[in-house]
Image (cartoon, rainbow, N blue to C red):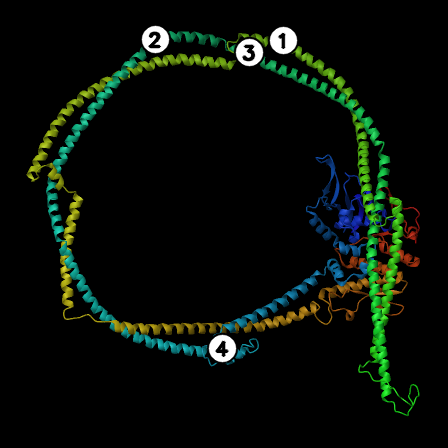
């Protein structure tokens, strides 16, 4: 990745849009120089933010990057065009920030609104990458090949962060190398081996659980001879497989023997039960014959009891059959009677219809006469009116053409008038606007003139507010330090107490030890012999030996504790004194600063409250000044816009005066020409019989319809009268015919009646009522005949069955079957018990057989699983660093790259350190056992030949080592990682810790590294570097923000 162009807008200390064109620098080293706080590091932050959405070193949140100098409507963003693998990409990114709204709220105030973070990526094809922020971040990492953390260690050494590169843990380096050198495949191999190891371990555990489950399913017979041995074997289900199978086979044989014994018992029981049930069934069959004899006797008695009802039904059936013979005469009489009644009814209906027809005929005759009179009077008049209207119809066409021409010219006249009025209105508006511009120009000029004064006032209030905030923070810090001082003084007191206690313990032990030694010597003294201490030969008062045993080691231990307590007391006292002096110095500075900002301040305790009040007052004044400045700035912008608009309107009003006169003349010409055509149109309109052609045609149609209606009505009335006359004659003829036919029907009715009653008398019926009572429907007669036959057959059948059972039971008696029932019940209960036992044994056998089969399969499967587990377990232990050296497969491969990096770094470090020390990858035997190891650094001293931790390097040594390491990483990455190419490096500070010779060597190495392709940017305050590096990016800061420019003057080679 090589940056080509960086654009910053309202970012950090840059108020407006600032652009850094790196292509101007080309390649080699360039120095970024400027005052403290001018925004040098912000350039690196901008590159990092554009690529990854975060600042270099990650010390500042992206939302904090909006410039404090930016105008309210200025957008904050960073745009970076960079080269990657020969292709150009462009990323534009904005952080989330707050800005002043462009519109007032309902209270008339400008509020702050939140602007969300956004990003845009232009691909080498010129198309924009489609995706959200997360997608764009992922795409950038894919393009460059590293993330922000890795980028910070490879290409951008942030201020104060170079030690991170040197002191990075193995885990951090592992993540970087995995991405750069694509060693993730080794990690995946580790994971797969671990997964396989866990898989087969899990399979073995499942197999063990299933084995226990299957052996647990084996159920022994009650009082089994194998119970003790089986329970012992269950304690070793994984090792004593053969013994378990053999024992299980013996258990199955025992179960099968038990099953056969039960089967034999069930067979014997079944034979006994069959014999008892056979005897009982023969007795039950004989008893059933007596039951059927009783049933047959009851049936005969019941049928005889019904005989009277059936005799009455036979008599009624005979009378019904006699009545059936008179049925034909009855039907003939009723038919004739019905015909006479129908003929009379038709005659009366026809008489009513004839009467109505005569009335309608009279009305039709009258209507025909009226219609004829109306036609003779109105039709001639309508024809005359119709002829007149037809002759005037051509006038409508002539009037239509004149009207169309008139409307066209009228529209032209109106359009001409409209254009004139528009020009007139615009002339008025522009004139009015010019007058308003004159008034506004005076006001805006006065308001814009205050802008320089307001900017100065705002800067003064800003500086004062920052000073108050700093003072307030200092006050908070001293309050915290004072609390810390109290704690330190208490610690000092506690240390003093501890020392006094230790001193007392030491004195006590020392005195006890001394007394104990004197007691030992006194024990050896003999009267008359000299004392080895004082030389006296008399010993009147010997020292007594103490019961407590105190050794010299115990005295030394007490002395060491006392010395340690004394050191702790001294340290605590020193810390308390230092903190007290620091608090005193801070208090003096705060009082001095407070005197400048607040005036004389005698009350120290109320200083914090005074600061808060003063800060609020200053903040209100600053907000007011900012508001006034914005208003003045807006007035200045409005004044420029107003002058431009005024010039435009002055030019416009000159044009409008000419256009207005031309449009007025054209409108008057069209108005005169259209007046003559209007008079012609009015004359034609007066000659028209109706207002328009549509109404004339409607009237014409009405006259034609009225004439045709009168003629049609006359014709229809005559036709109706003729039809009704014919209908009246036809109905009179039909009525005469009906009367003659009714006389004939009456004669036939009397003859049929006489024949019907004669038949009833011959059949023996006293009258018609007697006949009707005896009459019976045909279906009922058939049903009764069938029921009587069925009854007679049932009586015969019942007698026959009764006689048959009487003969079969002759000489026999009923038998008592209760004894055999009880015996059969007992045998059935025994059979049930035997069946339950057999079923239980069958279940035990089935489970045992299934367990035997499953156990054989499980143990066979376990042998294969153990082979696979041993294989993958060994590979997993090796690949995942579970052996004596805690080094996994991926780290082992990365260690080879790391050794190459260290070797490449040492080539430059040896020069920069003047052969004092080198870096080396920590020896395998020195690696720890906890956490991820294998990519740790040590320092080898060429002067002493000793190895020490990299953390022991001094500030300057650490910077040289970190710089050399970064360059070594760049070399190896360029040589081995094809997907990662870093053609740029940024170094923020660190050169100040080097002496002149080391700095010269470091710059020379950087120049060699840059060569013809790479670009290396350095931020430093070291003045000598300005003379050593010819390309400079100068950052200048003033009260309204920072600016950037390139400087290639004063070229000095190294």
Query: In the rendered view, would you say 758 is above or below 416?
Result: below
Screen quadrant of the C terminus: bottom right
| Residue 1033 visible in this rendered orientation of the protein | no
CA gap between label 4 and label 2 equals 133 Å
Q: Secondary structure at mark 1?
A: helix
Q: CA distance from mark 1 to mark 4?
A: 133 Å
Bin the neighbour count of mark 4 within 10 Å (Cα to Cα): few under 14, some 14-19, many 20 and up.
many
The image shows residue 109, relative to residue 807, as above or below, that is above
Please identify, in this view, whether the residue under mark 1 or under mark 2 is nearer the observer. 2
Q: Give whichever of 10, 314 is nearer the camera.
A: 314
Q: Earlier in the sequence, mark 1 or mark 3?
A: 3
Q: Earlier in the sequence, mark 1 or mark 2?
A: 2
What is the x, y in percent for residue 187?
A: 69, 63
Q: List the residue tagged with mark 2.
A: 373
Q: Which residue is mark 3?
A: 398
Q: CA distance from mark 1 to mark 2?
A: 54 Å
Whichever of labels 4 and 2 marks the residue nearer the N terminus, that label is 4
Q: Nearer the viewer, residue 156 or 789?
A: 789
Q: Residues within 10 Å of mark 2 (few under 14, many from 20)?
A: few
Relative to 669, does residue 586 appear above or below in the rendering? below
Q: Which residue is mark 4?
A: 248
Q: Earlier in the sequence, mark 1 or mark 4?
A: 4
Q: Nearer the viewer, residue 923 or 753?
A: 753
The CA span between labels 4 and 3 is 127 Å
**From where the camera sits, is residue 484 visible?**
yes
Do callouts 1 and 4 mark residues in contact (Cβ within 8 Å)? Answer: no
Between circles 4 and 2, the one closer to the viewer is 4
Write down the residue under mark 1: 676
Point 23% across, 21% down: residue: 352
């Amino acid at each position: 990745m090589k940056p080509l162009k960086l654009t910053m807008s309202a970012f950090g200390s840059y108020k407006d849009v600032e652009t850094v064109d790196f292509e101007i620098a080309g390649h080699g080293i360039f120095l970024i120089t400027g005052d403290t706080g001018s925004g040098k590091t912000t350039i690196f932050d901008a590159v990092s933010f554009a690529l990854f959405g975060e600042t270099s070193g990650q010390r500042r949140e992206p939302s904090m990057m909006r410039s404090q100098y930016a105008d309210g409507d200025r957008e904050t963003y960073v745009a970076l065009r960079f080269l990657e693998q020969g292709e150009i990409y462009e990323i534009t990114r904005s952080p989330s920030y707050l800005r002043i709204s462009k519109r007032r709220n309902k209270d008339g105030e400008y509020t702050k609104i939140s602007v969300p973070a956004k990003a845009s990526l232009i691909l080498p094809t010129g198309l924009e990458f489609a995706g959200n922020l997360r997608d764009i971040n992922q795409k950038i990492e894919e393009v460059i090949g590293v993330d922000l953390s890795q980028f910070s260690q490879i290409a951008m050494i942030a201020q104060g962060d170079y030690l991170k590169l040197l002191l990075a843990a193995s885990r951090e380096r592992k993540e970087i190398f995995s991405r750069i050198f694509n060693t993730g495949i080794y990690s995946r191999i580790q994971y797969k081996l671990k997964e396989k190891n866990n898989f087969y371990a899990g399979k073995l555990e499942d197999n063990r659980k299933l084995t226990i489950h299957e052996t647990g399913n084996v159920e022994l017979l009650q009082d089994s001879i194998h119970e003790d041995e089986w329970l012992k074997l269950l304690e070793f289900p994984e090792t004593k497989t053969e013994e378990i199978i053999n024992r299980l086979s013996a258990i199955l044989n025992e179960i099968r023997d038990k099953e056969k014994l039960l089967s034999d018992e069930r067979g014997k029981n079944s034979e006994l039960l069959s014999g008892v049930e056979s005897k009982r069934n023969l007795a039950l069959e004989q008893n059933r014959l007596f039951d059927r004899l009783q049933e047959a006797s009851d049936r005969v008695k019941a049928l005889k009891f019904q005989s009277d009802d059936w005799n009455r039904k036979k008599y009624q059936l005979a009378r019904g059959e006699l009545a059936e013979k008179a049925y034909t005469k009855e039907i003939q009489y009723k038919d004739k009677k019905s015909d006479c009644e129908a003929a009379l009814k038709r005659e009366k209906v026809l008489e009513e219809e004839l009467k109505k027809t005569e009335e309608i005929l009279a009305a039709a005759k009258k209507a025909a006469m009226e219609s004829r009179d109306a036609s003779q009077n109105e039709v001639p008049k309508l024809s005359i009116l119709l002829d007149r209207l037809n002759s005037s119809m051509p006038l409508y066409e002539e009037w239509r053409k004149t009207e169309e021409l008139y409307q066209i010219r009228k529209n032209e006249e109106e359009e001409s008038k409209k254009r004139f009025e528009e020009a007139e209105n615009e002339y008025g508006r522009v004139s009015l606007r010019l007058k308003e511009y004159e008034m506004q120009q005076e006001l805006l000029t006065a308001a814009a003139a205050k802008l320089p004064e307001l900017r100065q006032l705002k800067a003064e209030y800003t500086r004062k507010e920052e000073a108050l905030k700093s003072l307030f923070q200092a006050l908070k810090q001293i309050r915290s330090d004072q609390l810390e001082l109290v704690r330190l003084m208490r610690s000092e007191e506690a240390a003093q107490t501890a020392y006094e206690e230790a001193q007392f313990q030491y004195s006590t032990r020392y005195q006890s030890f001394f007394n104990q030694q004197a007691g030992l010597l006194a024990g050896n003294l003999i009267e008359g012999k000299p004392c080895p201490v004082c030389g006296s030969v008399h010993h009147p008062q010997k020292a007594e030996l103490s019961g407590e045993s105190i050794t010299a080691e115990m005295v030394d231990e007490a002395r060491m504790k006392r010395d340690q307590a004394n050191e702790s007391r001294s340290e605590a006292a020193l810390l308390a004194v230092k903190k007290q002096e620091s608090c005193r110095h801070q208090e003096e500075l705060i009082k001095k600063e407070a005197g400048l900002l607040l005036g004389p301040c005698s009350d120290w305790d109320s200083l914090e409250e005074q600061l808060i009040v003063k800060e609020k007052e200053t903040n209100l004044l600053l907000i007011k000044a900012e508001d006034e400045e914005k208003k003045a700035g807006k007035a200045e912008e409005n004044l420029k816009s107003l002058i431009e608009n005024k010039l435009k309107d002055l030019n416009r009003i000159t044009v409008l005066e000419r256009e207005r006169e031309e449009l007025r003349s054209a409108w008057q010409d069209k108005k005169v020409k259209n007046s003559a055509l209007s008079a012609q149109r009015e004359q034609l309109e007066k000659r028209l019989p109706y207002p328009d052609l549509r109404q004339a045609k409607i009237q014409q149609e009405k006259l034609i319809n009225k004439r045709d209606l009168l003629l049609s009505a006359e014709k229809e009335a005559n036709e109706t009268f003729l039809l009704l006359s014919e209908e009246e004659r036809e109905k009179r003829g039909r009525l005469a015919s009906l009367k003659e036919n009714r006389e004939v029907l009456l004669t036939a009715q009397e003859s049929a009646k006489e024949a019907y009653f004669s038949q009833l008398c011959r059949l023996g019926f006293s009258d018609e009522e007697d006949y009707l009572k005896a009459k019976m429907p045909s279906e009922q007669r058939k049903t009764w005949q069938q029921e009587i036959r069925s009854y007679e057959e049932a009586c015969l059948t019942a007698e026959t069955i009764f006689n048959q059972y009487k003969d079969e039971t002759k000489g026999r008696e009923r038998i008592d079957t209760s004894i055999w029932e009880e015996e059969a019940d007992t045998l059935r209960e025994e059979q049930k018990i035997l069946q339950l036992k057999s079923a239980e044994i069958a279940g035990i056998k089935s489970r045992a057989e299934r367990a035997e089969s499953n156990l054989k399969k499980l143990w066979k499967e376990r042998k294969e699983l153990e082979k696979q587990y041993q294989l993958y377990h060994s590979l997993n232990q090796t690949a995942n660093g579970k052996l004596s050296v805690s080094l996994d497969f991926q780290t082992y491969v990365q260690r080879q790259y790391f050794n190459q990096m260290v070797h490449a770094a040492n080539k430059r470090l040896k020069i920069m350190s003047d052969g004092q020390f080198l870096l080396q990858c920590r020896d395998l035997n020195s690696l720890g056992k906890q956490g991820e190891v294998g990519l740790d650094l040590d320092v080898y001293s060429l002067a002493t030949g000793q190895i020490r931790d990299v953390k022991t390097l001094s500030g300057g040594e650490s910077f040289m080592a970190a710089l050399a390491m970064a360059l070594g990483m760049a070399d190896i990455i360029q040589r081995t990682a094809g997907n990662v190419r870093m053609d740029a490096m940024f170094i923020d500070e660190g050169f100040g810790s080097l002496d002149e010779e080391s700095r010269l060597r470091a710059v020379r190495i950087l120049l060699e590294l840059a060569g013809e392709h790479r670009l290396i940017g350095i931020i430093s305050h070291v003045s000598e570097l300005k003379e050593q590096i010819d390309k400079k990016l100068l950052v200048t800061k003033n009260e309204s923000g920072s600016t950037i420019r390139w400087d290639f003057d004063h070229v000095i080679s190294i």
